[in-house]
Amino acid sequence: MGADLNIDWQTAAASAIDWWREAGVDTLVDEAPRNWLAAVEPAKAAPRPGAAPAAVAEIAPLPNTLAAFEAWRLGPDAPEAAWPGTPIAAQGDPTGDVMILIDLPEREDTDSGVLMSGAVGRLFDRMLAAIGRDRASVYLAPVCATRPVAGRISPEIEDRLNEIARHHVMLVQPKRLLLLGNAPSRALLGTDAARARGSLHGINLSGRKEAAGANDVVTQAVASFHPRFLLERPAAKAEAWKDLQMLIGTPNKSGSDT
């Protein structure tokens, strides 16, 4: 009793070769010696004869009026247009003297359609009331109009969103700008809120980096903590209160009811 030794080796070999060919193997050996440990550069596809070089997609200029910009911000050309979820527009009064920039909508905002909902929104409303304001008297806008799945702005899109946020502020031209959280602070001031807070920052809305000219519009920006952060670290509310006092141009007072 044993294995059947009557094997057609030619047929078996041909069958094996056919299997490897179907698997994508078309060369068994190479005539020249090869260093199998050397790095291999990916092969570059040769251009087809007569084929035109691939065109680089150009980014259209941002709308130069606030009404057109707000419509574009929710339209198919916005960076977040293909993301899941619904974009949320800026809210409040763009003709007022205070603009508030946040990073992105909260989870609850997607259902309500209102920026700063839930517990974060309730604290935000108390912060506004502490300086004699409400939502109707300020202009509230997000850097990112649609909440990312990960709940944070990815580095790959941050530069583009920062450019859009700066353009948004330029169109509104507020007298005072409140930057709540790191993303708005990085977009307008180039640094995190913890480093930027504690002083007024002049922003030349003409887009020029040199000293403002006679016809340039300059807004005063204040960086502070996002209410989301204050809910996690209530001890920081005292510092946030100082920032709010600076925003409205009154001397710091101890204590607040936020």
Image (cartoon, rainbow, N blue to C red):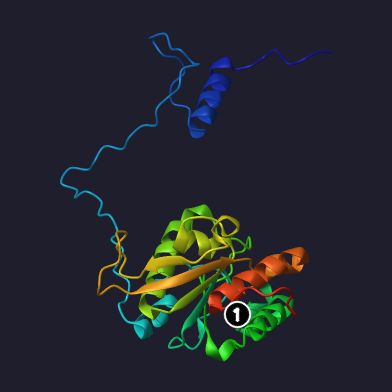
- Pick the quarter of the image with the N terminus: top right
Q: Is residue 79 visible?
A: no
Where in the figure is residue 105, as x and y percent of width and height?
Answer: 60, 73
Corner quadrant of residue 108:
bottom right
Toward the right, the furthest residue is 1
Q: Is residue 175 left or right of residue 235?
A: left
127 or 104, which lies in front?
Answer: 127
Element under disc 1: loop
Number of disc labels: 1
Q: Nearer the viewer, residue 69 or 224?
A: 224
Is 175 on the left-hand or right-hand side of 248?
left
Q: Amino acid at mark 1?
A: Leu
Q: Residue drawn 45% across and 14% down?
A: 29
- Residue 119 is left or right of residue 53, and the answer is right
Q: Is residue 79 above or below residue 155?
A: below
Is residue 109 or residue 132 the one in the foreground?
Answer: 132
Q: Position of residue 230 (x, y in %)?
A: 71, 67
Q: Is residue 56 above or below residue 99?
A: above
Q: Residue furthest left?
A: 50
Which residue is identified by label 1?
115
Q: Quadrant of residue 19?
A: top right
171 lies above or below 33: below
Residue 3 x %, y %: 76, 15
| Snapshot quadrant of residue 204 | bottom left
Please tell me which residue is depicted at 56% across the width and 91% down the height of the picture.
136
- Considering the image in quadrants, where does the C terminus appear? bottom right
Report x, y in % for residue 215: 25, 75
**Residue at image point 59% right, 87% down:** 135
Horizontally, residue 73 falls left or right of residue 105, namely: left
